[in-house]
Image (cartoon, rainbow, N blue to C red):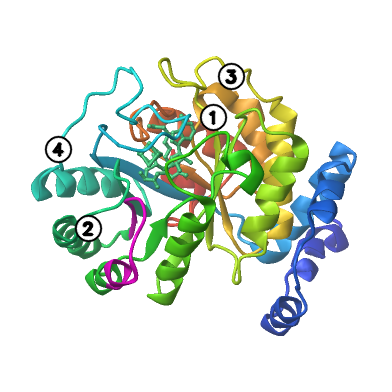
Amino acid sequence: MLDTQTVEKPITLVKSQADLRKELDASGSWSVAQIEALFNLPFNDLMLKAQETHKAYFPEGDVELATLLSIKTGGCPEDCAYCPQAARYDTDVKADKLMGLEEVLEAAKAAKAAGSNRFCMGAAWREPKDRDIEKVAAMIKGVKALGLETCATLGMLEADQAQALQEAGLDFYNHNLDTSEDFYRSVISTRGYQDRLDTISHVRAAGMSVCCGGIVGMGESREQRAAFLARLANLSPYPESVPINHLVPVAGTPLADQKPLDPFEFVRTIAVARITMPRARVRLSAGRQELGRAVQAMCFLAGANSIFYGEQLLTTGNPEAEQDRALLAELGLKTKQSSKTEVLI
Ligand code: SAM
Ligand code: DTB
Ligand code: SF4
């Protein structure tokens, strides 16, 4: 016979709006030491804490599916050491001009038909020009009219540009802190940490939701990973979406030969992001092909609840949609849109 106590347990973990409010008011800020202490917990204790947090804040346990499209590829003037789209590195990426509206809408329709919740348009720009904003605004309107959530990542924004994107119907803007402030200097020199924080403030001030995360496995220390998560968690409010990318080492970039991060450390990073930003969608982003099924399953257990979905990220590969559907179905994970496991099969 079923033990009802056991069955009901997760429900008692669900927090009321009042509890959430109280926690938010009392949240204060995270110190790097507190976050490092989470990283240092025995693996099982950390996983349990992350899973309890996840169950309390996302009782449905559904997974959001976001599809990426590179609307302007390559030729970027920045020097981000991980990026295959930086013009200064000799990679296989060819620079292209901004994609036309029809092509973008075709890709968005295909994403929707495949079951995606969100469509994210990425451009390899340091910052968009005002005439680019007009063109992207038309894309946002078109994608939104299809019934998808919209997201864009176009580089640094001025306040008025953020406003224009919001007026066009943009739901999320992605701009990453990427890593801790001190490690940042060894990865990017052409724009500063404060530039990134300024863009995030403009996005917030314009009333859009913030998608902000970073990359792990670039050679940073655990303390620097903790400092990176502290900066994210201490943003007030913290981002609604937190993409955690595992470095994809690309030939021709300065990080091409970077040794891969220990997979358990990646899982720990996901768990700590979940615990410190309990209401955020924590997204498994670049690097899923290399992680494999078992590590991804551990990441879902640690509280990841969003993935980039579709065969291509911006310029690098991602698992086949069919493979992802099979993995989610095998794990009994529902998707955000359908709320039904069966739809995935
Ligand atoms: N140019 C815009 C910018 O930098 O904000 C938008 C596109 S940029 C490619 C978006 C993010 O992709 C970067 O901030 C970084 O976190 C991630 N990214 C780029 N190359 C990557 C790689 N090789 N491995 C993992 N993540 C990567
Ligand atoms: C994010 O944090 N990861 C996505 C999205 N935001 C734009 C991009 C990952 C790019 C991986 C390398 C590439 O495909 O070029
Ligand atoms: Fe340019 Fe963005 Fe790549 Fe940096 S991450 S080189 S800004 S496209």
Q: In which quarter of the image is residue 94?
A: top left
Mark 1: amino acid: Leu
Q: Where is residue 155 in the image (x, y as percent from the top left)?
A: 35, 50
- Measure how far apart labels 2 and 1 are at the Cα level: 29 Å
Magenta region: which residues? 150-163
Q: Is residue 153 magenta?
A: yes
- Determine whether the residue tagged by mark 1 lies in a helix, strand or loop: loop
Q: Position of residue 223 (x, y in %)?
A: 77, 41
Q: In this view, does 30 lie above or below 69?
A: below
Q: Which of marks 1 and 4 is nearer the N terminus?
A: 4
Camera sees residue 2:
no
- Measure how far apart labels 3 and 1 are at the Cα level: 9 Å
- Determine whether the residue tagged by mark 2 lies in a helix, strand or loop: helix
Q: Mark 3 points at which residue?
A: 258
Q: Earlier in the sequence, mark 2 or mark 4?
A: 4
Camera sees residue 9:
yes
Foreground tag (2 vs 1): 1
Q: Is residue 55 magenta?
A: no
Q: Name the residue under label 2.
A: 143
- Cβ(mark 4) to ligand 3 < 8 Å? no
Q: Where is residue 168 in the image (x, y as percent from the top left)?
A: 22, 69
Mark 3: amino acid: Gln
